[in-house]
Amino acid sequence: MVHASLQEAAVPSKASGYAAALVTVVIWAVWVIATRHGRQGAIGATELGLIRFGVPALVLAPVWLRTGLMPRGVSPLVLFLMVCGSGAPFFHLAAFALRFAPASAAGVLLVGAMPLATALIGIAVFRERPDRLRLAGLGAILLGIALLLASLIEAQHIAWQGYLLLPVAATFWAVYTHAFRRSGLGALEGSALIAVWSFLSHIGLAFTVGVDFSGIGVQALGIQVVAQGLLSGLAATVAYGAAVRILGSTPAAAFAALVPVMAAFGGAFLLGETIGPVDIIAALVTGIGVALSTGILSRRR
């Protein structure tokens, strides 16, 4: 009876982890499209960064004021890796790449590559051992990436710096995933610390290179405040942290492979980007990979 009760109690926890992961990937798709839209317009990377991290730093001020900027019991190295992996350095890498790469490519090479990089780090550094179905899923993600890159070989006027930097940014996020899991911090605490440290670094950057919001329309600014600050900067970070806590780093990150399909079609419908058959196939193959790499179909042990 006690064993059965414990099993029943564990079900909602697992379900809440999957729900948090799904909320995260929807917001990530919105973020890819919004960042691509902003970088095509008059909004600079520093201005976007101030919005992206300033809003959650303000909203979560009670949290980081309580923990302090350097919480006791948290390794400074782990905190540094968290901030680099999902804070200002990651943001600027991704934002720079999205000046050149379309949303469909970013969905595959950035968000789709996150679970692959997370798994590889887990295997190489922490001796994690994914089962065969999860490995097959990760292989499908790799195939989707290969299909996308192969389609670009004969293309002309491709800004390769965007395509090359997207997987680097994905690796940054994978580092954050493992660092957060080992930090001992809760989702709100981790989100607050990443936001405030990244916001402080952007204030320093603003004094160095300057900022200019004068050319940004009210509508465009409002879109970025919602997409960057409230959704990506606050809601998605908290939801992803909760998913990592409940599901583990690799399964939580694997959900990100759902984003390629969302980003590809979102970029086409909302930004007027052109997507071809290979783009759609690459996104779908990567999406299939997530269904396997999450471990949903794996045998329970």
Image (cartoon, rainbow, N blue to C red):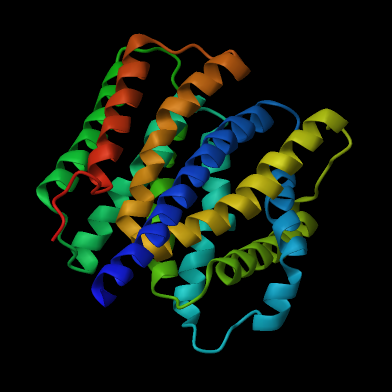
Task: Give whichever of 19, 141 is nearer the camera.
Answer: 19
Q: Quadrant of the C terminus?
A: bottom left
- Is residue 223 something that shows in the picture? yes
The reply, left or right, for residue 51 in relation to residue 284 is: right
- Up/down of 69 relative to 162, above or below: below
Q: Position of residue 132 (x, y in %)?
A: 10, 47
Q: Position of residue 171 (x, y in %)?
A: 37, 52
Residue 68 visible from this viewpoint: no
Position of 175 relative to 139 (above/below): below
* Residue appearing at x 23%, y 54% in the figure: 120
| Front position in the image: 94 or 224 | 224
Q: Quadrant of residue 61?
A: bottom right
Report whether 66 appears left or right of 241.
Answer: right
Q: Quadrant of residue 16?
A: bottom left
Work out which residue is located at the far bottom of the displayed protein and give it. 72
Report x, y in % for residue 52.
68, 50
Looking at the image, how many numbered discs can be counted on the residues?
A: 0
- Taking the spot 74% from the left edge, 49% from the top edge, the residue there is 51
Residue found at the far front of this picture: 1
Please tell me which residue is depicted at 25% across the width and 62% down the height of the picture: 122
- Residue appearing at x 46%, y 22% in the figure: 264
Residue at the outermost left position: 132
Q: Quadrant of residue 8?
A: bottom left
- Tell me if 142 is positioned left or right of 187 in this view: left
Residue 294 is situated, as x and y percent measured from the top left of the image, at 28, 47
Q: Is residue 170 above or below residue 16?
A: above
- Indicate the quadrant containing the N terminus: top left, top right, bottom left or bottom right: bottom left
Instruction: Indicate left or right for 28 with 121 as reference.
Output: right
